[in-house]
Image (tube, rainbow, N blue to C red):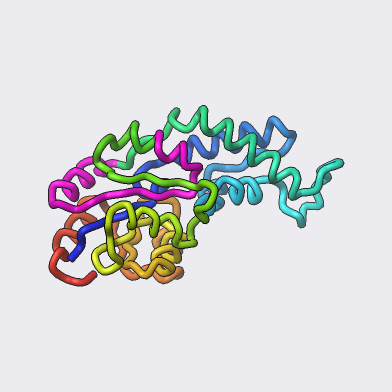
Amino acid sequence: MVRNVIFDLDGTLLDTLDDLADSMNHVLTANGFPERTTDEVRRFVGNGVKRLVALAIPAPETEWDFGDETREEVTERLFREMSRYYADHCEEKTKPYDGILSMLAELKEAGIHLAVVSNKIDLAVKELNEKYFGDLLEEAMGEKPGIRRKPAPDMVLAVMKELGADPADTIYVGDSEVDIETARNTDVPCISVTWGFRPEEELIAAGAEHLVRTPEELVKLIVHNLREEI
């Protein structure tokens, strides 16, 4: 019986892509690097801001001249700049995907406990959760010291502990291969949504077992399976 649903944030509940791309390009151009397209940023996200920065700066094979810094030092410096800039500009174009708020309300009305985890920094996750979802989600957690980023199970396990959840009554919902691996590492079923940052064929290739194409379909799948195993 499903009693708890834990969601990914970016690409699952919130469309954050434009703010991420704009912030990344601001930092890149401020440091003399070429901008990235929105589609490139879409492919780069999912493993945290530092990984986004590492992929966004010129690749090693381009033999870009980083001056007196190593590529790793540039990544660390731009990671700090990106974290600060995005924290101040993470709400300019971000919005919930269509149907998300009513989907969350329906699940909560069905007596299901809801939470969100993200590889964003913890403060940003909590601020975005409070602004867009209010009291619909009981727990919100992001990257912070002592909690490894997804696909490690740490965030999901920590939230499950707060909810009093068990793997047998919990489902994880996400939009990427990182989320599929996170659920696998946590030993909970994963539902993959197709409206996010990864195309359906990539999700299938990553081992997606349950695909939904709309928030309404997600509600039907979860509520229909309240007494069945997904």
Q: Residue at x 41, y 46 (%)?
A: 141
Between residue 159 and residue 16, name the one nearer to us.
Answer: 159
Q: Indicate yes or no whether the magenta region holds residue 49.
A: no
Residue 33, position as x, y percentages in the image: 72, 38
62 with respect to 124 (left or right): right
In the displayed structure, 1 sits above or below 34; it is below
Between residue 88 and residue 36, name the one nearer to us.
Answer: 88
Q: Residue at x 74, y 34 (%)?
A: 32
Residue numbers of the magenta segment:
98-127
Quarter occupied by residue 213: bottom left
Q: Residue at x 33, y 59 (%)?
A: 172
Q: Residue lying furthest right in this view?
A: 68
1 with respect to 70 (left or right): left
Residue 43, position as x, y percentages in the image: 53, 53
Q: Residue at x 64, y 38 (%)?
A: 80
Q: Indicate yes or no whether the magenta region holds residue 104.
A: yes
Query: Dividing the image into 4 quarters, which one contains the C terminus?
Result: bottom left
68 with respect to 128 (left or right): right
Mark yes or no: residue 201 visible: no
Query: Dividing the image into 4 quarters, which one contains the N terminus?
Result: bottom left
Residue 175, position as x, y percentages in the image: 39, 56
In the displayed structure, 51 sits above or below 90; it is below
In the displayed structure, 32 sits above or below 44; it is above
Mark yes or no: residue 37 visible: yes
In the displayed structure, 186 sits above or below 47; it is below
Quarter occupied by residue 101: top left
129 with respect to 106 (left or right): right
Number of marks in the rendered image: 0
Quarter occupied by residue 201: bottom left
